Amino acid sequence: MSKNIHELEQIMFPPDGSGVKPYEWMINPTRQRQWIDKQGVFLWLAFFFSEIGAGLYFVSLFYQYKPGLVLGWLITLILGGLVHVAYLGNPFRAWRMIMKPNTSELSRGIWIIGAFAALGLLQMVTSGGFNIVFNVIMGILCLLVISHGFATMKVIRALPAWISNMVLPFSIISGVWIGQQALQLMFVFGGQAELVSGMEVWAEAFYFIYFLCLVLYVWGTWHANEIGAASIKMMLSDELKQITLIGVVGLAVVLPLVLTLIMWGGDTNGFMVFLRLASVFAGDLAVRYIVMKSAVYKPLLERS
Amino acid sequence: MPRWGMVIDVKRCIACWGCSIACKEEHFLPPNVFWNRVLIGERGKFPSSSKLILPILCNHCSEAACVEACPTGATYVREDGIVAIDDEKCVGCRACLVSCPYQQRTYYDKEVKDREYFPGQGKTELELIGEKLYPFALGTVIKCNFCTERLEDGIKKGLEPGVDEDASPACVNICPVNARVFGDLDDPNSKINRLIMEHKGKQLRPEFGTEPAVYYID
């Protein structure tokens, strides 16, 4: 009997906290679940793929490198777009999301991605696609697509961890940083050693801006209010500690720093470029995961 | 046109959870889905501690964060102030759910639909009847609707919401200590407005600027 009761309790109130007792709801800082748990992981991946695809497209514009444009465009639309749709409860109604661009950030994002898809395709298929006007328009669209995910999160006032002013700069630099890494690797595969070496100066700059934005985000959120601080503490809780230490500290910060220092001044190596891309790729995924997973709501009933 | 709202007297509330149960019964809500909750907290340390009781439900905010976040217009504020969801328009993006500072919405997916009150023993007849009588659309968000059906039916019959039980929300009717009062916020002579003015009614988390239609007095 007692075993049955225990089993019942496990079903009704699973240890992951998803079945919290009704009278304990929102009396402690409560984690947001919808945009990261269960089906929510699709949204995390969708934001990430949109960001890195647009980042690759953006950096490729400066080198007028068509394969980079094509790959960036495909990653943004195929991976980012399809995973986005997979997240929705009713994907066949997704067209309705273009209805409210005046208020909803999600709706504006659909318009921006639509414009990116159409103009990007035009730029890739036309012979004079790399003219200055086209490049500027596409550059702006890329930056908007990169920041779309975090811009959607930033308008949610209920979650202090997401409304930091550093969210958008951090999002943009992470997209550009990974895009630059991906393009550098494409040049490695293309045997363009001079370009690979020449790009290293950008890698150094982007890494330090990325690191600075990450530190400022954590510092700003910690000092914003007690709920922001609770989010930062949650990053180091038992549940998220490993991802924070291995993913964020190890893969997003330390390993790329070591590799960047080794290749300092353009002394590049194909394997290390690949290793750094893999590291920042996994690291940025971890950063986004942690940011989404550790966002908490202010309790409705405060205990003192 | 009235603007419906509610006053909850937290001093009267005895945390009997009658409102939670009546609401579940009225809308046939699946296990672990609550449109009405009674939160229990504690302040101070023994022996000088006090118990805090806070009944909560959707605040039907006039500046609702969920309405702003909805990319399809599925969530909207009706003329009578009730925040409603058009499940035909909802894409299930859950932006409303994440935006709500009060966390009063639930995503209704297959996992929620399949929950049984007696796990492993199949759904009871009442649960099956509920699914037919009060169906929710899969992949959409659900929440308290101030018992819109009761309100509308009651008004059609010439009854007065907040006064006549058949035109008032189930949680208001069930409350054994009359801690809940329902009425028209736009009528300066309504009981609800009198209570708000006399007791200096407070809204929950006013710092979010959502202008809730649920007020608390003590």
Image (cartoon, coloured by chain):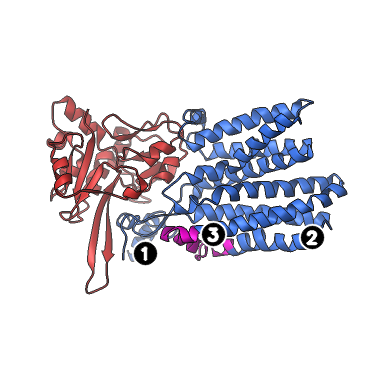
Chain colours: A blue, B red
Image quadrant holding the C terminus of chain B, namely bottom left
Q: How many marks?
A: 3
Q: Nearer the viewer, mark 3 or mark 1?
A: 3
Q: Mark 1 falls on what kind of element?
A: helix
The residue at the far bottom in this view is: B47
Element at label 3 = helix
Q: Circle 2 is placed at which residue position?
A: A264
Secondary structure beneath label 2: loop
Disc 2 residue crowd, few under 14, some 14–19, many 20+, Cα 10 Å: some
Mark sitting earlier along the chain (3/1): 1
- Give x and y (percent) for residue B74: 40, 32
Q: What is the distance, in whole Å, between disc 1 and disc 2 at their CAs? A: 62 Å
Position of residue B211 relative to residue A251, above or below, is above
Residue matched to label 3? A218
Residue A282 higher or lower than B132, as above or below: below
Q: Distance between the Cα atoms at labels 2 and 3?
A: 27 Å
Label drawn at residue B101: none
Residue at 13% from the left image edge and 49% from the top image edge? B176
Q: Report the span colored magenta.
A: A221-244
Do tag 2 and tag 3 residues touch (Cβ < 8 Å)?
Answer: no
Q: Which residue is mark 1?
A: A3
**Closest to the observer, B134 or B203:** B203
Residue at image location 56% in from the left, 39% down from the top: A84
* In this picture, residue A217 sits left or right of residue B71: right
* In front: label 1 or label 2: 2
